Image (tube, coloured by chain):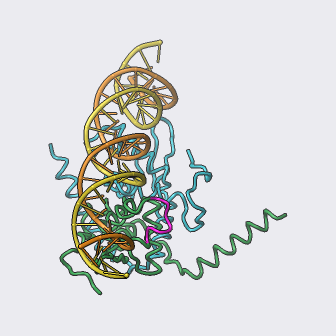
Chain colours: A cyan, B green, C orange, D yellow
DNA sequence: ACATTATTCAACCGCCCGGTTGACCGTCCA
DNA sequence: TGGACGGTCAACCGGGCGGTTGAATAATGT
């Protein structure tokens, strides 16, 4: 399911076509949340879907979007398909962005607190 | 020279809402190209629009999307509005992404040489 | 005063995106 | 063998996005 190079708008070697898909994939909060979940551990699709209120089919679609962007990889083993982070997508985005300046290396504790805060929002949102 | 704080777009790095706009803004190749143009120099809207085939109104919309995401700032002086990069948006995205691993900060000169070498290899292969 | 330039606004259009539901398919197990 | 489980597929729907055109606004030039 790859996009042919033939429909590249302008021959711009510094603009890999994949960035469209990567940034579009990252633009959705559900998908970002999925990525941060996969940061903890590889997960089966059902387990990824569990904390969300939306249908399993919706999550399945989100996962294929992430896979299409090279942000995760899915491996089917038996009847469950495992999802794991794929650094390639994130790296491609990171490389492009670094053309706009290196930003101070992040304090990882800050980031952890940020993720925790987001997690709290999620659990709050999830109570029925 | 500087834009008053009053019309600073909300791009609080700790706000997941902002990431939606930022990544969505970056997901469009036209907008990424605009950003790389602004990397060279600040520009008026018309000048930004010049190299594109689409209408000026379309570019104007793209610019307001970028401004809304905190990726650029627009300052109207006289009858022309100047556009300049705003590091806040890019930094917010970068902060979030670095939670998924620091990718070696790229020395842009190194990177350029790498690209050049790759290109040479490629043409060599084709010429044989 | 008038025309020109610079930019935005408003309405519209086609298409893609995120979500749903229901059927379907493959795999494990009692 | 027959379910129950895990996951995808297909069709559909509402809304938002990227683009257009044409009018409107505001500042400048003559």
Task: Please state which of residues B29 and A27 is positioned toward the viewer in this rendering.
Answer: B29
| Residue B109, quarter of picture | bottom right
Q: Where is residue A108 in the image (x, y as percent from the top left)?
A: 33, 73
Answer yes or no: is residue B103 visible.
yes
Side (left or right) of B119 relative to A10: right
Q: Which residue is drawn at 44% across and 81% down?
A: B41
Side (left or right) of A76 relative to A114: right
Q: Which residue is drawn at 45% across and 57% down?
A: A22
Is B40 placed above or below C19 here? below
Q: Give the range drawn in magenta.
A: B48-54
Q: Where is residue A88 in the image (x, y as percent from the top left)?
A: 52, 61
**Name of the residue lying farthest toward the left:** A128
Task: Please state which of residues B20 and B46 is positioned toward the viewer in this rendering.
Answer: B46
| Residue D30, quarter of picture | bottom left
Q: Which residue is drawn at 51% across and 40% down?
A: A77
Task: Please state which of residues A39 and B56 is positioned toward the viewer in this rendering.
Answer: B56
**Residue B81 belongs to magenta span:** no
Answer yes or no: is residue A46 visible.
no
Side (left or right) of B42 relative to A14: left
Could you tell me what secondary structure mostly forms the magenta stretch?
Answer: loop
Q: Position of residue B106 (x, y in %)?
A: 52, 77
**Residue B53 belongs to magenta span:** yes
């Amino acid at each position: 399911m790859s996009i042919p190079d033939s429909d590249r708008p302008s021959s711009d070697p510094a603009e890999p076509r994949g960035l469209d898909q990567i940034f579009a994939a990252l633009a959705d909060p559900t998908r970002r949340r999925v990525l941060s979940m996969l940061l903890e551990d590889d997960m089966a699709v059902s387990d990824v879907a569990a904390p969300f209120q939306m249908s399993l089919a919706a999550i399945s679609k989100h996962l294929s979007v992430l896979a299409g962007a090279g942000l995760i990889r899915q491996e089917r083993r038996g009847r469950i398909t495992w999802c794991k982070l794929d650094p390639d997508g994130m790296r491609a985005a990171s490389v492009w962005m670094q053309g706009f300046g290196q930003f101070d290396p992040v304090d990882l504790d800050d980031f952890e607190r940020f993720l925790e805060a987001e997690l709290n929002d999620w659990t709050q949102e999830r109570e029925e």
